[in-house]
Amino acid sequence: MTETTRRARGGGGAARRAARTAVSFETAKYIERNIPNFEVLSEEALVIIETNAEIILEEVGVNFPDNPAALTRWRDAGADVQGERVRIPKGLARKLIKTAPSSYPQHARNPDRNVVVGGNNLVLAPVYGPPFVRDAAGGRRYATMADFRKFVKLGYMSKWLHHSGGTVCEPTDVPVSKRHLDMLLAHMTLSDKPFMGSVTEPSRASDSVAMADVLFGGLEDRTALVSLININSPLTFDSVMMGALEVYAAANQACIVSPFIVGGAMAPVTVAGTLTQVAAETLAGIAYSQLVRKGAPVIMGAFVTSIDMNSGAPTFGTPEAAHISYGVGQLARRLNLPYRSAGSFCGSKLPDAQAAYETANSLNMGLLAGVNFMLHACGWLEGGLVSSFEKFVMDADQLGTLHHLAKGVEIDENAQAMDAIREVGPGGHFLGCAH
Amino acid sequence: MTETTRRARGGGGAARRAARTAVSFETAKYIERNIPNFEVLSEEALVIIETNAEIILEEVGVNFPDNPAALTRWRDAGADVQGERVRIPKGLARKLIKTAPSSYPQHARNPDRNVVVGGNNLVLAPVYGPPFVRDAAGGRRYATMADFRKFVKLGYMSKWLHHSGGTVCEPTDVPVSKRHLDMLLAHMTLSDKPFMGSVTEPSRASDSVAMADVLFGGLEDRTALVSLININSPLTFDSVMMGALEVYAAANQACIVSPFIVGGAMAPVTVAGTLTQVAAETLAGIAYSQLVRKGAPVIMGAFVTSIDMNSGAPTFGTPEAAHISYGVGQLARRLNLPYRSAGSFCGSKLPDAQAAYETANSLNMGLLAGVNFMLHACGWLEGGLVSSFEKFVMDADQLGTLHHLAKGVEIDENAQAMDAIREVGPGGHFLGCAH
């Protein structure tokens, strides 16, 4: 008997000892909703917004600066290209996006942690992007690689978090040129959940794909990365972000194509106007991903905040943001695309009551809006400037609520509990009842 | 020219000085929803629950202890009465409640503060019942009449609160026998918003009606009081609460007929079982109000919390409570009755992040569940043991969010903002745009 077959049989004291001492954390399966979506827009409003979005694409167009290859792709597809401006005739973008999948698996190192993006599902991922961290002991400070690794470990240990995320904080003590390598290594070695790739340079997207290829022993077209491609709203697709998108789409890796909108600054101050711009931008961006590679996996995104019109400060957990997120959900479902929005958003500088009100507003809204991929689902503080260790843990606990809400109401005979009500009768109590 | 006509013309320096120095606080109109309700139960589930509720009423029945007059009313209406047990044949309760109004005004001292209970409306009222108060300076202590008066003043000054409430805290320094008189006097003199009557004794309900009659210079059948009648779940209607209901119904004053349910203790642990019991109890209680006086105004209530099955501690802002509240909303709308549920519920002992998460969960749920009258909308702390001054103010601010969410999305030409999007174009910003 060879050593290999003995191991495969799992025999021996060493194997038993290893199993006994192995550290393992329970992770909930991604949410599969059994409740309806909440919809605020009428059919009439949806048609107006969709029509207006295509008018904007045809009449105003979008800019693809510093990206001759993109302009060529658009021209070949039938768009009207003048300089860097791409005007997309009515119907073209909607036709192009039909090849984007409505749902697909994202593979994790541990296959038990694979997630399916789209459909009725909701995948929860942690905060993304803050240059600072804060905790009670150390206060607010620039994030380091040590902080980054701690957040990845926290995410790995969080039962209600399905995803390791990406830039859980910006490790500012590592040069930008090699930062993405260290961040990816942390996700790959300190967690077994799926994770995100780098987007700060096309070459770093290529590095991300190459590292994933090594990790999976050959990706073979499997989608192992979901990465965040922000649109430079209004209506601009810069070459850094588009360069990363081109790398990922070509490799069949997923991109969240997401307008980054501060309402009133990067989009009109009205909900309907913002929805029109979001629809135009996501149509153009997702159509472009399909020009790079038909069938490339995408997520229709909307990062929406509003500004305090007096101070200019960004605000979070507001009714306007909720309406926009409900509306984009309806638009995404009509386009048959997975949807990203919401998160543990707050403007507060501390993980206090203000932070919790705003966060709960946004988390509840995200669940009911039909979001499929929720980035920033825990740990967000101070308008996204800070990743908070304490808030990460508190928010992650609240994510459990979303799992239970999503289950809906059981109505089988046991749930009806008629025997229990009959047994207890008027004036009794149910604590000792057999039910 | 007489003094009266001069005053009526508003002339004179004294009148101008009085107008200049008058203190006036803006109060928002009650919420009129322009958004859909969120519904978790299928038609099939609703029919099962409604059918089961009537089976419980017919087979198990409800108790009306120490109340011979109630038993006579039920017997005369066709119920099967044996001892204190009232078994209500299928169809009877549903027939009786048809005379209850689906919507009605509650009059306030200041007619501008009148509210309309029912329909798509949501009326917000403050915390009710805690024997303790807490603030940062004084800590946790027994509530006094001075605290009570302070809460009434806070409610008067709160823009997003439409209602002065009732027992905003229990003033424990005033004897119970005369406490209700002082509390009513405070609501009548320190606020001009509508308020609630006493329910701790039928004679105190009579006192409440008599005082309202004085305040309004003769009520003449106008509804000026909404009062909280708790059902002693499971399935028991005690004579103190029913005595108060009888007084109010006879005087055309409104009652919230509300099972007080700690899930797993006073009702089955399942959502469907609790909904069945809530439906049975509210059907019986509201039918009884119509036996006292056809057309008496009511609100179908549900106060629902769950217990931690390990510690027995009540929990708030939970998914189970949300499902029950969504479900009771559907049942109430099918019965064409106004609906009371939700509030600033939390289990936390301090107005901290836990309190805010749980409160935001419940407030958002209440708006989407179609609640018409939300008691406890601000100030609730420590599972309802404490009225918190700080949380009252923070919660009241959050209630503004509900007003804006309820407005829905405008889609007129201005809201579409096409000119703004055209004017700004790719890469610009909207801060200086004419829109």
Image (cartoon, coloured by chain):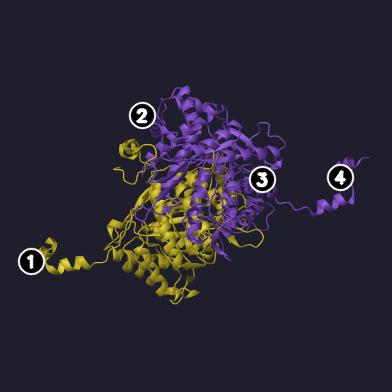
Chain colours: A purple, B yellow
Residue B10 position within the rendered picture, expressed as x and y whole percent measured from the top left: 13, 62
Three-letter code, disc 1: Thr
* Three-letter residue code for mark 2: Glu
- At x 13% / y 68%, what residue is drawn? B13
**Residue closer to the observer: B275 or B26:** B26
Residue annotated with mark 3: A193
**Dots 3, 1 in contact, CB < 8 A:** no
Chain letter for the residue marked with disc 2 in the picture: A
* Extreme residue toward the right, this view: A1
- Which of pointers 2 and 4 lies earlier in the amino acid sequence? 4
Q: Would you say B166 lies left or right of A367 here?
A: left
Report which residue position mark 1 lands on.
B2
The kind of residue tagged 4 is Gly
Q: Nearer the viewer, mark 3 or mark 2?
A: 2
**Numbered disc 1: secondary structure:** loop
The residue that label 4 is drawn on is: A10
Instruction: Check the picture and name the quadrant holding the N terminus of chain A.
Output: top right
Specify the label residue A59 is tagged with. 2
Marks 3 and 4 sit apart, C-alpha to C-alpha, by: 25 Å
Query: What secondary structure is marked by label 4?
Result: loop
